[in-house]
Amino acid sequence: MKKIFRLFRFAGPWAKHLVAATLALFVISAVNLAAPEIIRRVIVVMEGGNLDAAIGSIVRLALILLGLFAVRGICQFLNSYLSHYASWKMVNRLRCTIYDHLQKLSMSYYHDKQTGQLMSRVVNDTQAFENLIAHALPEVITNLITLIGVFVILLTINPTLALLVCAPIPLIFGLSMIPRLMGKFFAQGQKKIGELNAALQDNFSGIKEIQVFNKQEQESAKVREKSTEHATALIKALFFAGVLQPSVGFVTQLGTIVILIAGPIIAYRTGAFGISDLVAFLLYIGLFFAPVAMITRLMEDVQQGIAGTERVFEILDTEPDIKDAPHAKNVGRLEGELEFRNVTFSYGEDITVLDDISFTAKAGQMIALVGPTGVGKSTISGLIARFYDPTGGKIMIDGIDIKDMTLASLRDQLSFVLQDVFLWSGTIAENIAYGCDSATPEEIEKAARVACIHEFIDGLPDKYDTVIGERGVRLSGGQKQRLAIARSVLRNCPILLLDEATSAVDTETEREIQKAIDQIIGQRTLVVIAHRLSTIRKADMIIALQDGKVAECGTHEELLTKGGIYASLCAQQSVS
């Protein structure tokens, strides 16, 4: 119930719609309770024997019943529309809340999460709440009220029979263990659909590799396995649902059998129980047990909704590792002087990646980080952006500890060009302007010229309005890199980080990218993580890392003269 109450908080703005929908259900229940009584009165009039004299009363009662049915129809519409309106608005709000929260979570959260799993929690798990809020819970409440109302009416008609009617209820409570088993398998089903989504997302993203390596059958087998596991979990849940409903239906019919036997006996012995009372009693019996059967059926929907809440609130209850300090401030635009002061970083307690790293890059300087794979070069760029926090030491921009800045204002100082460039399935212009919403076409073109990509774009049929496909599938690796550089140029931040921007391109493309980099040297602070050392000869300072430590630093010429790690790397690449 705590989870359900917490879920209802998201429906706050639409509480009046839910209240109105629930009131409409109350009216529907009242009409349902009144209908058998009107029918009983018609039978009483007919028992009088004078049909001609009773016509007026029968017509009046029929018109009243017709009016009640009309009111019920209007209330059914109001209940259906208002409850669905409120529940889908709430689902929409909850989905947006989950997505916003996911955007705040640190990179460490995503290390062991599959994209498809997260998508399933945002889309599939929240969808179950619509049925919970719009149908299950309101109907559980109104059915309970109907149950109580009918029982009171039955007591007024004949207390003895009313108590006999309750005889099968303990058997119904005995069936209450079944919904728990249903809930267990529905929760498994929610988990398995997340795993299926994750497998599909991975496979669609890697469809080229699947085809190249002829792995279609193996991947199809994985998808079939996940799909089968999802179907199996739901089938098990629905098996118990299938057992529950007819079992409850059978038990509730026992009440009718009891009345058919006991009703005439009481009528003959006491004479105080007429045919109209028996008919009314039988009609009310249907209304009495219908809510019991309905509540047990609705438990299926309730259990599905609860299974979803557990997975959704697991995300919402996760706190980001990296967040603004209470004293953090918006620093505005800075000059771009970058300093690492005795910075240490570890993954967990056992894996030290960086050990006592110190260096300073003046505003407008170009510094390069080199070294073998796994020495922490990319970790340094992640620390600058506060994707992670150092376990020791400080990182400062213009003398301000980056922890004293808000995350938003820190990242306003930074632009990234990564080895694995991410592009959206939009136009070239939209991708270049992604970090600068107010960019004009002229500014977009100017950035493209700086990035040495304008001539290529200008040769396309739709030029800057060319749609590049998902993740830029229609572009080469070098074209993607230069678009990313154009995006960073247009963003015009004080610090630009290039993480292996030329490692996966050919020599000609590398020269084009290098020309683009040359045009922005001196205009902002450049932090270049380099695999190809030919691209960093103009760096003001080259830092060679080894075993997570600064092994040596200096200019290209200085480090060649030293004959150390950098000189060895240059020799391997024939860089002089």
Image: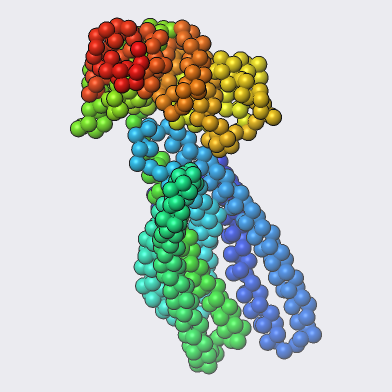
Q: Nearer the viewer, residue 564 or 241?
A: 564
Q: Position of residue 275 (x, y in %)?
A: 60, 87
Image-based side of 318 in relation to 141, left or right: left
Please report the residue visible at 61 percent of the width from the left and 24 percent of the height from the top.
456
Please report the residue visible at 61 percent of the width from the left and 49 percent of the height from the top.
85
Query: Relative to residue 274, is residue 485 depicted above or below?
Result: above
Please report the residue visible at 56 percent of the width from the left and 81 percent of the height from the top.
282
Locate residue 183: give its quadrant.
bottom left
What is the residue that sits farthest to the front in this orientation? 574
Please report the residue visible at 66 percent of the width from the left and 19 percent of the height from the top.
441
Query: Relative to residue 15, is residue 362 depicted above or below?
Result: above
Q: Nearer the viewer, residue 53 or 491?
A: 491
Query: Relative to residue 356, is residue 421 depicted above or below?
Result: below
Q: Position of residue 225 (x, y in %)?
A: 41, 59
Q: Nearer the viewer, residue 462 or 58?
A: 462
Residue 447 appearing in the image? no
Q: Position of residue 254 (x, y in %)?
A: 46, 82
Locate residue 400: give its quadrant.
top left
Residue 67 appearing in the image? yes
Q: Position of residue 67 (x, y in %)?
A: 72, 66
> From the image, which quarter does the C terminus lie in?
top left
Query: Relative to residue 182, is residue 443 depicted above or below?
Result: above
What is the residue that sits farthest to the bottom in this orientation? 268
